[in-house]
Amino acid sequence: QVQLQESGPGLVKPSETLSLTCTVSGGSISNYYWSWIRQPPGKGLEWVGYVFYTGSTNYNPSLKSRVTISVDKSKNQFSLKLSSVTAADTAVYHCARVHPMPTSAFDMWGQGTMVTVSS
Amino acid sequence: QTVVTQEPSLTVSPGGTVTLTCASSSGAVTSGFYTNWFQQKPGQAPRALIYSTTYKHSWTPARFSGSLLGGKAALTLSGVQPEDEAEYYCLLYYGGSWVFGGGTKVTVL
């Protein structure tokens, strides 16, 4: 059974870069998209973006200028970098596996990690 | 900016049936939006229920079903159980990016 686990700092200062890693266990990172989704406290879900195992990416247009998602197949990990953060970026960040078209299923999710942006 | 709209809240009696909908500001939702549905309970990660409009995951209870209804994506819960009380989110595909709906809070009362 594939499992995903997010890791990274729980506190980031405003204007700095948020960096998170998702470690995939129990399966290969190949042949899937790997996504980041966030949820501000008390609010709904927001798709941040995803990376294909080959390294190609797609991002939420509203975040595109600040987001970089990359994959490290040798470590079975993928990562999120979000630059110039503000309090509005405070959220639980989840990583998830996405099947390619036509299945397009977001099936496996990590438990999520809370990131607070504050000085 | 595309907006995906869901009912903010719905109430259903145990054993009853409720249908949640998911509308796109860009027009009718079709199979090409590859609709996903998720269930989220407080303090938990979302759990996938439906993908590609109608397909269930191996763990999805039979009482959940996905469809297209009147230009919207729909999630129907039949024979609702108390444990179905949760927030439900739809997710639509827009040619390279994805957009979540705002969520529907389902109360079983």
Image (spheres, rainbow, N blue to C red):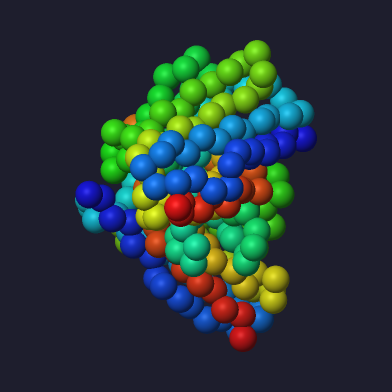
Q: Position of residue A54 (x, y in %)?
A: 50, 15
* Quadrant of the drawing holding the C terminus of chain B: bottom right
Quarter holding residue B41: bottom right
Left or right, A27 with reference to A72: right
> Toward the viewer: A68 or A10?
A10
Taking the spot 64% from the left edge, 43% from the top edge, the residue there is A110
Taking the spot 57% from the left edge, 27% from the top edge, the residue there is A78
Left or right, B58 with reference to A114: right
Quarter holding residue B86: bottom right
Quarter holding residue B8: bottom left
Q: Position of residue B54 (x, y in %)?
A: 51, 48
Q: Position of residue B24 (x, y in %)?
A: 29, 55
> Toward the viewer: B67 or A2?
A2
Q: Position of residue A117 (x, y in %)?
A: 46, 51
> Is B64 situated above or below B105?
above
Taking the spot 71% from the left edge, 49% from the top edge, the residue there is B59
> Toward the viewer: B40 or B15?
B40
